[in-house]
Amino acid sequence: MVHGSDGAERATRPVRWGVLATGSIAARFTGDLLTLPDAEVVAVGSRSAAAAGDFARRFGIPRAHGSWAELAADPEVDVVYVATPHSAHHTAVRTCLLAGRAVLCEKPFTVNEAQAKPLVALARERGLFLMEAMWTYCNPVIRRLTELVRDGAIGEVRAVHADFGLSGVEPGHRLRDPALGGGALLDLGVYPVSFAHLLLGEPTEVAAWAHLRDGVDENTGMLLGYDSGALAALSCSLVADTALRAVVTGTRGRIELPRGFFFPERFVLHRQGGEPEEFTGPTQGGGPTFVHEAAEVMRALRAGETESPLVPLEGSLAVMRTLDAVRDRIGLRFPDELGEPRASAAELPA
């Protein structure tokens, strides 16, 4: 929780953030944090002191640490945002939790459930806040959508369709590197899978097919089945710029989300026999923003909560199990899962 002599102080003073890693996602998150009046970015950590120093100067951060452990040990940090590639999430999050820091970890939570479960157990054992940075779940428009579904606006959900594909991911990109947990599934497919989980829960059946190249999946399709009789048809790709849309179909209507379904500004509700209804949320000011997930972390910390009801840890574990099942069906294993050495810390982006 936020450090302070009492609950009143905890509830009123800014939450002090540390940022672990200095890549593009860390930069975007930090830029958004700086727009929040109740947040302070007080430290950054990297394996490279030079990278940490450059990042600190760029964003006006007072302290730069040349190791993850030094950042985690900083007593002025309330919560650490982990922005490494997901192949390093387990190590980075564990380092922070062992030092007594609350953690917001980028998606996907880890590479597999076997890595995620010990982190959840450690956070619970130590009474520390831990959350996967699934910004979709914190988006106001998605929260309104789930309320409508829960209230029966489209009847019982029977199908979810969603896709997330990019083109032009060239050799040498981290998404092409199996040592970094690359491929379409974990980095892009986690969005359609998480979206389906939000509406339908954990599937009872998982079918999948993928085209593999150089040790990663580059074009993957998934069909998830549920005891309710519902299904989710999902896809992800490194070779095709897909529509990036989603449709939720129920027994009495459907909801359509436009391009960018994973962080939408609007959706259209089609009730059976009725006229289309458009729902809009607060403008994102030129694109998706991290402010909603950061605000949820700070709300939870001030309330003394150890996990968010919007992004519960059991849900993150369930999504990891589904991703594991998909990888099992398509025959995708990463080097460390095959007994081969993973990329060393020195080889990972700072």
Image: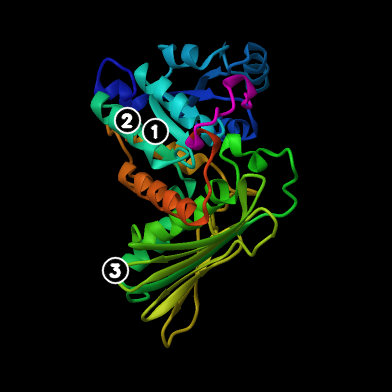
- x, y (%) of residue 18? 49, 22
Q: Earlier in the sequence, mark 2 or mark 3?
A: 3
Q: Amino acid at mark 1?
A: Met
Are discs 2 and 1 less than 8 Å apart at CB?
A: yes
Q: Which segment did they paint magenta?
A: 337-350
Q: CA distance from mark 2 to mark 1?
A: 6 Å
State which quadrant residue 308 falls in.
top left
Write the residue at 58% across / 48% down: 288
x, y percent for residue 59? 63, 23
* Local SS, label 2: helix
The quarter holding residue 113 reads top left
- SS label for mark 3: loop
Q: Is 145 or 339 nearer to us in this picture?
A: 339
Residue 209 visible in the displayed image: yes
Q: CA distance from mark 1 to mark 3?
A: 36 Å
Q: Which residue is mark 1?
A: 298
Identified at 44% across, 12% down, the residue is 74
- Residue that mark 2 sits on: 302
> Is the C terminus in the top left, top right, bottom left or bottom right quadrant?
top right
Can you say whether 217 is above or below 22 in the image?
below
